[in-house]
Image: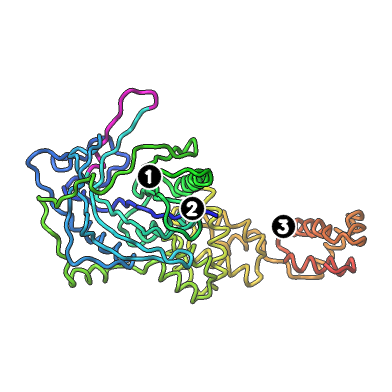
Amino acid sequence: MYEPVIGLEVHLHLKTRSKMFCSCAAEYFGDAPNTHTCPICLGLPGVLPTINRQAVEYGIMFALALNCRVAEWTQFHRKNYYYPDLPKNYQISQYDRPLGTNGWIEVGGERVRIKRVHLEEDAGKSTHPAGADYSLIDLNRTGAPLIEMVTEPDLTSPEQARRFLNHIRSIAQTLGISDANPEEGKMRADVNVSVRPKGQELGTKVEIKNLNSFRSVQRALEYEIKRQTRILKGGGAVKPATLGWDEAAGRTYLMRTKEAEADYRYFPEPDLPPLRITREWLEQVRARMPELPARKMARYIQAGVRPYDAEILAYSPSLSAFFDRALETGVEAQKLANWLNADVAGYLNERGLEIHQTGLTPEHLARLVRLVEAGTITGRVAKQLLPEVMEGADPERLVEERGLKAVTDETALRTLVEEVIAANPQAVASIRSGKLQAINALLGQVMRKTRGTAPPEVVRRLLAQALEVDA
């Protein structure tokens, strides 16, 4: 029996106005290549970098959110390696004095330890056109401010890794320090994974790079775990290496043999002084932090929301903000959560939208929920109205204008029930012969006659009474 051991390295593009060590604009997505550069981020001779204070404060904030110990002083190092889109041939990063260490977050009730959080600058971007004998270099990203976060090897499944990344993205977005959008390259993950016989020492790990979505992380891990398990079962040995991920082929491939720390020849950045983080500065940053997803989740559970639903809401910044506003109307928390996590989420996913990109207001959703709970309309009618309510329509006005209030007059319903029974002798015979599921066909016909305004449970009871069966 083999088990995987997984660690993650996550890079977050920080939402600062300027780059990490120069004044070039840090927001480059969608702009023409090589239009956000200067002598500093291009590494030209004689230039001097300066530290972006906002990036440091974002790093402190993120480290605190991950329960890390924030260093009293830290410093930047040069990490030396050659890469076509790294103009200086070194990256300014942090080595043995990271900004934060020894943190943790909870994922599904299990603690995942955070080894370190540090700041660094990004490299540029290489594009390799299909079939061409050349590559294109865009240096807009060079020098962009990054947080790198490294976990301990505490993750045990591809699904848990995906959930962890979702938590990290939510924390970054809640803090407002990063858009954390993988599609724009603003959140990237590298994966370290090994496989071992259950309960034994750690196996030989490989690193998988070029993972640009949470789905890719999960798929790459699933593939690599199977590959390593197959090698070990066959009596072979896994070789340490850096692998790439081919999304189209659904497989990993060898990029290079694994580097060691010595290969990078770290040494302190001579142009930047050590950075001291005073207690006063630390507390000023802490005081500006918003309520974090873990605290929101605990608050939602206390309000009566099931843990599963509470986690979904708490770790979606847009949904949690909407949920909090809707709760102020006094609607029951779990019933509101049911609508947000099921019907509303389905509408959003189908159209690729966030809730703030629709016309739905917390007040209108709360009114829709109340109409159902009060018995004014049926759940079926509410679901029919939801698309229009998502576009900004007032549900109470729609119900009034279209005459969609629930039919509660049992005398009128009994008449419809009798009409449907008389028109469907074969279904009636099936029901009376013991095939009770056939009653659903009659129920559906009554509901259509009432345009969904009849309470289904009442119609089912009236049908059972008329047919003298238990249903």
Q: Secondary structure at mark 1?
A: loop
* Horizontal arrangement in the rendering, residue 186 relative to residue 298 (left or right): left
Verify whether residue 462 appears in magenta: no
- Indicate whether 418 appears above or below 283: above
Q: Residue at x 53, y 71 (%)?
A: 305
Q: Is residue 42 visible?
A: yes
| Circle 3 or circle 1, nearest the eye | 1
- Indicate whether 401 appears above or below 331: above
Q: Most extreme residue toward the front, as rendered?
A: 235
Instruction: Name the kind of residue labelled 3 in the image.
Output: Arg
Q: For mark 3, does the 10 Å Cα neighbourhood hold few (<14), some (14 to 19), or many (20 or more) residues?
A: some
- Label 2 and label 1: CA atoms lie apart by 20 Å
- Label 3 and label 1: CA atoms lie apart by 64 Å
Instruction: State which quadrant residue 1 falls in.
Output: bottom right
Q: Residue at x 34, y 30 (%)?
A: 128
Relative image position of residue 339 (x, y in whole percent): 56, 63
| Circle 2 or circle 1, nearest the eye | 1
Instruction: Name the kind of residue labelled 2 in the image.
Output: Pro
Of residue 263 and residue 370, the one placed in the foreground of this image is 263
Q: Most extreme residue toward the bottom, as rendered?
A: 302
Relative image position of residue 81 (x, y in whole percent): 22, 41
Residue under circle 3? 451
Relative image position of residue 445 (x, y in whole percent): 79, 56
Q: Residue at x 17, y 42 (%)?
A: 41
Residue under circle 2? 158
Residue under circle 1? 240
Q: Secondary structure at mark 2?
A: helix
Q: Is residue 352 visible?
A: no
Instruction: Name the kind of residue labelled 1 in the image.
Output: Pro
Q: For mark 1, does the 10 Å Cα neighbourhood hold few (<14), some (14 to 19), or many (20 or more) residues?
A: some
Query: Which residues fall within the magenta stretch?
Result: 130-142
